[in-house]
Image (spheres, rainbow, N blue to C red):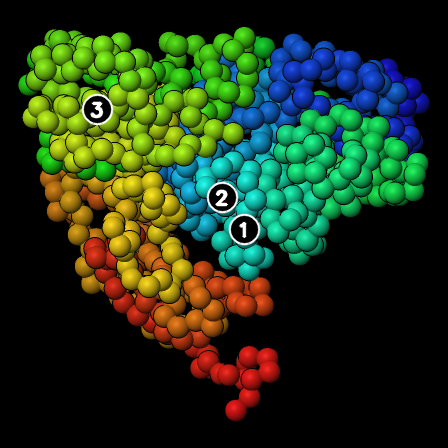
Amino acid sequence: MTEASSERALYWDAAQPVLRRVDDLLSRMTLAEKVGQMLQHDGQQDPVKAVREKQPGSMFHLLNERLAEAMDAAAATRLGIPLLVGEDGIHGHSFHPGATIFPTQLALAASWNPELLEQVARVTAREMATTGAHWTFSPVLCLTRDQRWGRTGETFGEDPFLIGELGAAMIRGYQGKGLSDPDGVLACAKHFAGYSETQGGRDASEADISRRKLRSFFLPPFERAVKAGCMTFMTGYQSMDGLPSTANHWLLREVLKHEWGFEGILVTDYANVGRLVYEQRIAPTLVEAAVIAVRCGNDLIMATDDFYDAAQLAVERGLLLEAEIDEVVRRILTLKFRMGLFENPRRPDREAQKRVVSCAEHRELNLRAARESLVLLANDGILPLVAAELNSVAVVGPNADNAVAQLGDWALGASQYSAEYGKQPRELTTTVLDALRARLPHAKVTHAGAGDLWSKKPAALDEALQLVAEAELAVLVVGDDIPFIGETRSTATLELLGNQNALIDAVAAAGKPFILVLIASKPLVLPEGASRAKAIIECFNPGMEGGQALGEVLFGDRNPSGKLTISYPRHVGQQPIFYSQVRGQHGSRYADYTQEPLFPFGHGLSYTTFRYENLKVKTPLVHKGQAVELEVELSNLGERAGTEIVQAYVADLVTSVTWVNQSLVAFERVTLAAGEKRCVRLLIPYERLSLVNAYEQRIVEPGEFEVFVGGSSARSALQRATFRVDGPAFSYEAIPGVSR
């Protein structure tokens, strides 16, 4: 027992109010112990030694037996304060061998299904909890802007409203029944904020974002996360207007903690405090960096263990007050007490892992997630296939049998863990090749050694083309791979690498019928030959069950329902191509090229046809605080059931500041039987009509609005109607210094 526990110190008494327990424990702590609580140590680096020397409050990248040793070491310290254990459970328990690895965020977003994402997060939390983790560094609430950014696949796409809805669902799933839920984990909203507004797509470059632009587009998903009860936030790597996110007092203290009332803890991203010295160079030494970090509102300092000595030196030199350290430690301890970690440190449990990790229920949910994430981009009628009619199929392309690429970033085999940790067990992942061979046991299913197609070796291309020539049908599975995905791995182009373009164009030129399957972290530019594909299916990184889900869609067991949450470019030079552009551009195209995407935001086909008719606005005059009520008739004109994602967009026709041409304000998944017609009702809350004015105020301005409803953001296919928001007309008196 520790010294404090043997005396039955008040802070060990679970019957006491949390604030009394925090006060009691804080009063017993030395400055060194307080600063130690602010450290988040990388558990890959001698965790027991770190506990004995610096008593860090948190660790990450540490599970099972090695974590148990660190927990024992923490329990043996003078005060016995338990560790708060974080891990990157990004789309499943990423780095635990055998865990359920779901589709990545960009893939999951294509389901447009918050209920599904909540369940995915709940399963992830259950699996993480058995290994001793208390906290996942997810969800990512960044907006995709330049798709060359290596972390595009970690996002939910390009729309702030949709990101907020899906993020809130995952937060609910992760945190479960509350902070004391032993089967839950803390969620973490990241990266706060503006990290994805890159220059040239480069990772962590200076983000050119005004405060108004932040409030307009980048902050709303994070404010939604606070309202959803998210208990942790993580800063970004980038800087804005000369200030790294970790050093942005306005963003972290004034907005997050004061304006929004966030009561959780704020953790820096990896080594962000150290980067203030050696990378961004706004502090001469770590002592000054420690002062900046504390004053600006950071609570846990990730992977900068030298902060331990630096912060103490800052207090000794009078640069920081110990009371400022106390303020931070109070937040950390409060969270630990509210989680019940002093009573139950939630140690790793191997027996529970046997029952929970990758159990049948979790695998079934993973398959459902993969099914709903697939997006049918194009189909000339070849799909669904009839298995009995196929005698020979060539399955070629570098991702046809690439389990690591199928899982995507943030899984064993990716860049975050070294190769010595291995990969996820191969037998847990069904690749495209696996699925087609299982589905066509009577047919000849050939496969080239297509890994070489990443390069431009002619022999690999020749082998693949020979197999295609000998087959009735080709399934080309192309995309990107781990070396071109993730942090520090932005790309200068969006082109398919190696021989992939040559493969597509050669197959198209030969007139061979082919289906194009895309397994990639983000939209990639397709060659001319892709336009002759009989069908195109976007899978993104579909997880362990991606091949099985694709096989079901190809052969018509499942009717695809996924829709893009990111616009699909024709050319890399169209960046940024997100659908909600600010009005005012001269012209509607480049002098030498279209600005239209290949596939727009919200696009996705089905094996049936849906028709929208008779859009009605039930509230033609909308008063302050009143929701807009819409009705539209949706019909399934086909011969099979299907699910359509009904989308509603609004445009404020005259605004006091420049604003977007349209914005998503509501959506609903609607399943109709063959031939069924239904009146779909949509409610648009008043606040979704808002904009951010020139004074950084989010308001709803009176005047005329248009509303568009349909199956994608493409205006040409949308039903239109109008309504008016009640209020005084625009007046020049509202502008300071202007009078008639």
Q: Residue at x 43, y 71 (%)?
A: 655
Residue 418 image-quadrant placement = top right
Vertically, is 11 above or below 1? below
Vertically, is 1 above or below 659? above
Is residue 380 shown left or right of residue 86? left
Residue topped by disc 1: 208
Residue topped by disc 3: 502
Distance between the alpha carbons at the discs numbered 1 and 3: 38 Å
Residue 528 x %, y %: 18, 35
Is residue 292 shown left or right of residue 604? right
Nearest the eye: 670 or 187: 187
Looking at the figure, which quarter contains the N terminus? top right
Q: Residue at x 58, y 29 (%)?
A: 136
Residue 68 x %, y %: 69, 13
Identity, as a three-letter code, of the amino acid under mark 2 = Gln
Q: Is residue 430 visible?
A: no
Q: Residues within 10 Å of mark 1 (few under 14, many from 20)?
A: some
Identity, as a three-letter code, of the amino acid under mark 1 = Asp
Helix, strand, or loop for circle 3?
helix
Nearest the eye: 600 or 620: 600
Contact between marks 2 and 1 (CB within 8 A): the answer is yes
The mark nearer the N terminus, 2 or 3, is: 2
Distance between the alpha carbons at the discs numbered 2 and 3: 30 Å
Residue 542 x %, y %: 36, 26
The mark nearer the N terminus, 1 or 3, is: 1
Residue topped by disc 2: 199
Contact between marks 2 and 3 (CB within 8 A): the answer is no
Q: Is residue 702 visible?
A: yes
Count up the numbered dots: 3
Helix, strand, or loop for circle 1?
loop
Identity, as a three-letter code, of the amino acid under mark 3 = Ala
